Image (cartoon, rainbow, N blue to C red):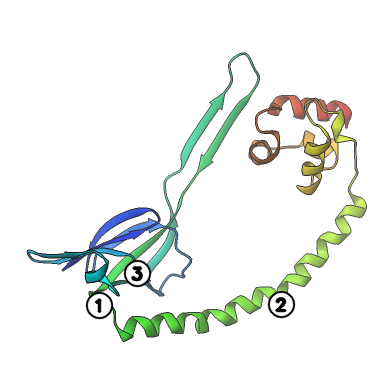
């Protein structure tokens, strides 16, 4: 018996005991996950598909592990400019072993879904209680942090300076010590290719 399920915008043909790697799911390793979006179920030469036939059909799987795919490197450059950008990305994946295919659902699956929030609720409360302690520490930092007029940098206006301050960059010394990874985030969210990495670091060192 096999089934075709859809998750993360992709379709997978699965059978019992198959191990598949899908886009990241918000579940912990060792827990049970239910796929409700079943597109097809087949057994031998008999194949069923479509909503009226597959209403309530479910595929049950056990989460083996949370992992990440191979790193993909992206390099961008602009002709006659000092703009250089190198980014790396590793997609988060979830590995799942298919344990059961239910053509019409079942009480077992419903009970598993209901039990999951109860088991996860205490874990969600623990970070919430610890959060105020972690949040109290950074309050002392702004008193010591130096604030410079970031708009003196070429290509950085008041709007960009405000966004840099929100990101925690308020002085030339901080911008002079930018790493390539930090600049990549700032370039994506603030500069958008208008300010080259070498330029902002060099100017910040001169003004620091």
Q: Give the mark count.
A: 3
Residue reaching furthest front? 52
Q: Position of residue 103 (x, y in %)?
A: 22, 74
Q: Are marks 1 and 2 in contact (CB under 8 Å)?
A: no
Name the residue rendered at 90%, 35% in the picture.
Answer: 149
Q: Earlier in the sequence, mark 1 or mark 2?
A: 1
Q: Position of residue 173 (x, y in %)?
A: 84, 37
Q: Which mark is residue 129?
A: 2
Of badges 2 and 3, the one in the foreground is 3
Horizontal side of 192 relative to 166 (left or right) equals left
* Of 169 and 12, the residue lying toward us: 12
Q: Position of residue 17 (x, y in %)?
A: 23, 68
Q: Are marks 1 and 3 in contact (CB under 8 Å)?
A: no
- What SS does tag 1 mark? loop
Where does label 1 land, which residue?
Answer: 104
- What SS does tag 2 mark? helix
Name the residue rendered at 71%, 25% in the picture.
Answer: 198
Q: Earlier in the sequence, mark 1 or mark 3?
A: 3
Quarter of the view holding residue 114: bottom left
- What SS does tag 3 mark? loop
């Amino acid at each position: 018996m096999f089934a075709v399920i859809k998750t993360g915008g992709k379709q997978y043909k699965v059978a019992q005991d198959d191990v598949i790697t899908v886009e990241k799911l918000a579940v912990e390793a060792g827990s049970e996950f239910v796929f409700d979006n079943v597109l097809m179920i087949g057994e031998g030469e008999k194949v069923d598909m479509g909503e009226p036939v597959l209403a309530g059909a479910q595929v049950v799987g056990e989460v083996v592990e949370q992992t990440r795919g191979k790193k993909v490197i992206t390099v961008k450059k602009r002709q006659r400019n000092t703009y250089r950008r190198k980014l790396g990305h590793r997609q988060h994946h979830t590995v799942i072993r298919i344990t059961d295919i239910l053509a019409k659902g079942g009480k077992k699956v419903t009970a598993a879904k209901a039990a999951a929030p109860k088991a996860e609720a205490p874990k969600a409360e623990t970070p919430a209680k610890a959060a105020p302690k972690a949040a109290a520490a950074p309050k002392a930092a702004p008193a010591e942090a130096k604030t410079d007029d970031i708009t003196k940098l070429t290509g950085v206006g008041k709007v960009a300076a405000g966004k840099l301050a929100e990101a925690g960059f308020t002085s030339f010394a901080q911008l002079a010590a930018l790493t390539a990874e930090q600049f990549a985030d700032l370039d994506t969210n603030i500069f958008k290719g208008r300010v080259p990495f070498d330029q902002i670091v060099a100017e910040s060192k001169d003004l620091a």
